[in-house]
Amino acid sequence: MNKIVFNFGLLVFCIAIIFFGLQKKNPVDTIIYSALIAVFVTILAALLLIVFIRSINRRLEEKAEEKMHNDDMESSDEMFLDRETNDSKF
């Protein structure tokens, strides 16, 4: 995932160089502005990705806990039913 974010930042850097280069600015200013924008966008994308992945992981953990709880309840119900059937046979 980090590789995708850094490649996206590099793409933004290249697009920013083209954009500022077409405005006939000083080449040094063009590179500085492009680098600043690329760094900002890359950091923002990384933070958004972290938040997104954590929310997905949290949701998956909740589902797993809910499933485990439901499985435990079903197994305890089956044990209770087995006891009732065993008691009634005697």
Image (tube, rainbow, N blue to C red):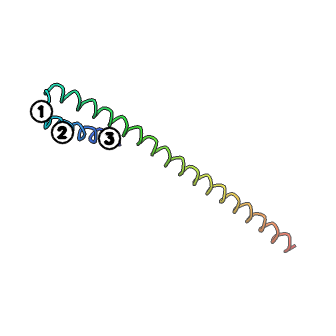
Q: Where is residue 85 in the image (x, y as percent from the top left)?
A: 81, 72
Which residue, given by chain and number where applicable, does mark 1 sit on?
24
Pointer 1 or 2: first along the chain: 2
Disc 1 vs disc 3: which is toward the camera?
1
Residue 19 circle label: 2
Q: Position of residue 69 (x, y in %)?
A: 66, 55
Disc 1 vs disc 2: which is toward the camera?
1
Disc 3 residue type (three-letter):
Val
Disc 3 vs disc 2: which is toward the camera?
2
The quarter of the picture where residue 29 lies is top left
Residue at image point 74% right, 60% down: 76
Q: Position of residue 39 (x, y in %)?
A: 30, 32
Front residue of 18/90: it is 18
Q: How far apart are marks 3 and 2 (CA)?
A: 21 Å
Which residue, given by chain and number where applicable, does mark 3 sit on?
5
Disc 1 residue type (three-letter):
Lys
Pointer 3 or 2: first along the chain: 3
Crowding near pointer 3: few (<14 within 10 Å), some, many (20+)? some
Disc 2 residue type (three-letter):
Phe
